[in-house]
Amino acid sequence: MTEKFSKIMEDLGHQRSPDIGPDFEAGIWSRVSQIESRQLARGRNGLAAIMLVTALSVGMISGGNEAIASSGSSYLSDGPDYSPATLLHILP
C-alpha cells in the first residue's frame, strides 16, 4: 500500500501544472456567488410553494363551513348575578 502511494505521489510530482491566469481567483469567487444565489433562490421558491399549498389547503378545508353566530351562553352574563349587591345580599 505504501509503495503504491509513493508511486502515485512521484507520478504527480513529475506532472507539469497548468498555467493559472491572473483572473483565476476572481472567477472562482464569481462562481461561488452564482451557486450561492441559486441556492438561496431555490430556498425562497420552496418556502413560497409550501406557503401557497398550505394556504390553498386551509382555504379549501374551511371554505365549506357556514358562518353561524354562536348561541352559547356566557358564564358571566347568563348565569347568576355577580353584582356586589347580590353577593352581599343587600336589597335595593
Image (cartoon, helix red, strand yellow):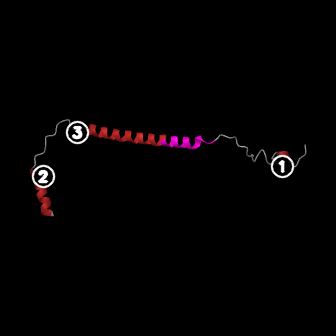
In this rendering, the count of numbered labels is 3
- On the image, the x and y values in percent for residue 84 come to 83, 46
Q: How many C-alpha atoms fall within 10 Å of the one at disc 1: few (<14), some, or many (≥20)?
A: few
Q: Which of marks 3 and 2 is in front?
A: 2
Instruction: Give whichever of discs 3 and 2 has the lower sequence position.
Output: 2
| Mark 1, secondary structure of its residue | helix
> What is the chief secondary structure element of the magenta stretch?
helix
Question: Left of 45 or right of it: where is 6?
Answer: left
Nearest to the observer: residue 40 or residue 62: 62
How far apart, in angstroms, are the residues tagged by discs 1 and 2?
A: 97 Å
Instruction: Give whichever of discs 1 and 2 has the lower sequence position.
Output: 2
Q: Farthest residue to the bottom: give it.
A: 1
Residue drawn at the location 55% of the way across and 40% of the way down? 59
- Residue 87: give its label: 1
- On the image, the x and y values in percent for residue 78 come to 78, 46
Query: At label 2, which amino acid type do we have?
Result: Leu
Instruction: Give whichever of discs 1 and 3 has the lower sequence position.
Output: 3
Question: Left of 70 or right of it: where is 16?
Answer: left
Q: Quadrant of the N terminus?
A: bottom left
